[in-house]
Image (cartoon, rainbow, N blue to C red):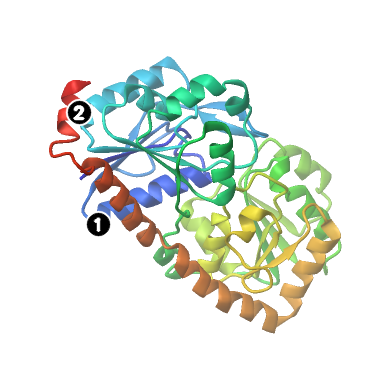
Amino acid sequence: MRVGLVCPYSLTIPGGVQAQVLGLARVLRRMGHEARVLGPSDGPPPEPFVTPLGNSIPTAANGSVAPLAPDPSCALRTIRALRDEGFDVLHLHEPLAPGPTMTALVMHPSPCIGTFHAAGDSSSYKYMNSPIRWLADRLDLRVAVSKDALALARGYLGGDYEVLFNGVELDRYRSSLAHPIDGPTIFFCGRHEPRKGLEVLLEALAALPPDVRCWVASDGPDTARLQARFAGDPRIEWLGRLSDDDKIARLKGASVFCAPSLRGESFGVVLIEAMAAGTPIVATDLPGYQAVARPGLDAVMVPVGDAAALAEGLRRVLSEPALAASLVANGTGRADDFSMDTLAVRYVELYERLRHPAGSRAWPDDRRKMR
C-alpha cells in the first residue's frame, strides 16, 4: 500500500507531531508499506523517505510558535508531489493547519484520514469555524490522539472520531547507550516557551542540593531571557537542539526526567519516551499527562506552576532509590501499552477500511477517475 503521511510542521525542527509522523512512517515501511512523508524541511530531509516541501515560517499558534509553511510555493510543491506519487491513502496530521495538510485536503486526490493532536483551545477553529468545518467534512476518517484532543476537535468541528494514542518506537529507547553523568541529573526537553514550564523548573532547582545538575535541551523564544535570569547557576547546562540519538542518550542517562508544563499538552508522549528509556519521571498533573502516567505509579505528579512542589517531587525521586526504582519498573510496563508497532497496525486497519469500504468493489481507483 502506498501511504502519504503529510505533516504541516518543519520536519527538521524537533516537535511531537513531527516525531509521530516520522516514527509511524519508519514502522509502516518495516511492515512492507510504501510510506512517504511530505512536509516542510528547513535543511536536508531527516530521512530518505521524506519529500521536502520548502522552508517553514515561524507562525504564532495557540500560545506557541509553530514552524508552518502556508506559502504558495509550498502549496505548489504539495500539489506536484501528490500528483506524482499516486498514494492509495493520505494520512494528514493536524489536517486543518495552514500549509501542506490543508492543501492536500482541498485537493483530496486520495482517501484521507486526519489525525488531530492539539488540545486546549483554538482561535482558528473559533473565528473561522464555517470554512474550517467545510474542510473537516472532506476527511473520510478522523482520529484524535487523546480525550483532550477529541474534546477540542468535536467541540468546534462535530463529527465522529476514533481515539488512538500516540506511539513510541520502544526499541530505539531500550537499546540506546546512556550518556554518562557525574552526579544527580535532571533532564528537561521541550520548547523554551511559557506553556512548557521551564522557568518553574529552574526556580525549583534553587531548592535542591548543590550537587544536582540540570540538562536543558532545545531552545525557543524564552531561551535568552532564561539564560540571563539564571546565569548565576553553574549547575544548569544549556544543550540546545539535540539529534534524536543524543536526546535518547541523555534521557537514558539522566537521574530523572522533568515535564513541568503549564497547559496545552494533549498527550504526554514525552513521558512514554522516558518510561521506555527507564528513567523516573516528575511531571505536572495535567490531564494530558495523566492520560499516560498513573500518578504515584509511573510518575510523581505535582500541581501545575508550583515550584516548591516540583522541587519536593524531584528531591524525593533523587534521594529515595526505592521510589525511583518503583517508578521505572511500573513505567517500563506502561510504555508497552504505547508501542508504535501497535499503533501502526491500528492505522493500517483504518487505511484498509478507506481503500475497501463496505459495498464498494473498485474504490478508490474509480473515485480518482471521477474527481
Q: Hey, which quadrant is residue 121 in on the image?
A: top right
Residue 107: horizontal and vertical position, in percent? 32, 22
Q: Hey, which quadrant is residue 203 in on the image?
A: bottom right
Q: Amino acid at mark 1?
A: Met
- Furthest residue to the bottom? 322
Q: Is residue 268 visible from the viewing direction of this image?
A: yes
Instruction: State which quarter of the image contains the C terminus.
Output: top left
Residue 128: horizontal and vertical position, in percent? 57, 21
The residue sitting at 59% across, 70% down in the picture is 279
Label 1: few (<14), some or many (≥20) within 10 Å? some
The residue sitting at 84% across, 51% down in the picture is 232
Asked whether disc 2 touches disc 1, contact meaning CB atoms under 8 Å apart, the reply is no
Residue 351: horizontal and vertical position, in percent? 28, 45
Q: Is residue 179 visible from the viewing direction of this image?
A: no
Residue 172 appears left or right of 57? left
Q: Amino acid at mark 2?
A: Arg
> Which numbered disc flags the more N-terminal residue, 2 or 1?
1
- Furthest residue to the front? 359
Mark 1: which secondary structure? loop
Residue 266: horizontal and vertical position, in percent? 59, 48
Residue where numbered disc 2 is placed:
367
Rendered image: mark on residue 31: 1
The residue sitting at 38% across, 20% down in the picture is 75
The residue sitting at 34% across, 44% down in the picture is 47
